[in-house]
Amino acid sequence: MVSIFLKGGPVMWPLLAVSLAALTVTIERCIFVWRHARKRQPELVRGILRRVEAGNIDEAIAVGRHAHDPVARTLAHGLLHRERALSGALLHSGSRELKPFQRGLTVLDTAVTLSPLLGLLGTVTGMIRAFGLLGQQQLDAPTAITGGIAEALIATAFGLGIAILSLVPLNLLNAYYERTKQEIEQAATELEVLLAQAGSKPDYREDPLRLV
């Protein structure tokens, strides 16, 4: 493997850096998702909504503020500010809870985009080297010429491989982010409906569903 790597030319070193960055982010994100999944408390979220429906607002806030579930914490923050700006509080808290889910996604997205381009650059440099040897009439050194072609193919293969392997965790992490976002949005909407039915007057000037 080392010999193949070295045959890929100088472009292999930035490709190696990109692959290590993508691998590090993937491992860290997998640990994050695993820890987050263990902290989820859907029953607690439903318990908060039931308490709100029963009129036990203070009890619902107390339960949500000490929860590990991001949905529960979002609801508790909204209830704390229900008299002045319920929608704004839900929007702010939801965005804050979702921010950790986006960490590292830019690195993976960059790896997916940059790796094929670096591979293409390796292709170009390898072919330049091969045709340069032909231009110097070094036809007695076919190994050197084929080495330039091999450099082009190896760099391209590594670039595409890194992009493909980075694309899978990127899409899975984006899907997990979107699912969590939808859960927060649905719970926020249900909370506003329950408060409206109870006679509260939340501020509807902002839409809590437009989470970033």
Image: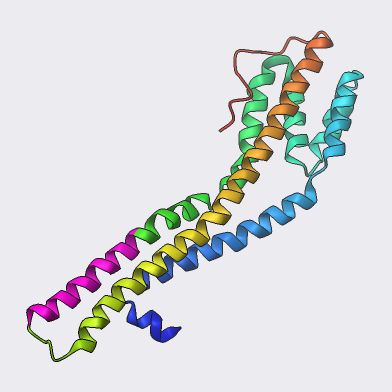
Most foreground residue, 151 or 46: 151
x and y percent of residue 153 in the render? 33, 72
**Residue closer to the observer: 196 or 175:** 175
Which image quadrant is residue 195 in? top right
Is residue 170 shown to the viewer in this render?
A: yes
Image quarter (top left, top right, bottom left or bottom right) of the C terminus: top right
In depth, the one of 204 and 42 nearer the eye is 42
Question: In the rendering, at what x and y percent does residue 99 appear?
Answer: 59, 42
The colour scheme applied to this rendered structure is: rainbow
Residue 105 position in % (x across, y down) = 52, 50
Please say if 9 is above or below 120.
below
Is 157 on the left-hand or right-hand side of 32?
left
Q: Find the magenta span and give its range.
A: 117-136
Is 118 part of what is drawn in magenta?
yes
- Asked whether residue 170 is drawn in magenta, I would say no
Q: Residue at x 67, y 18 (%)?
A: 85
For the stretch drawn in magenta, what is the main secondary structure?
Answer: helix
Relative to 4, is 72 above or below? above
Residue 14, placed above or below residue 86 = below
Query: Total label count?
Result: 0
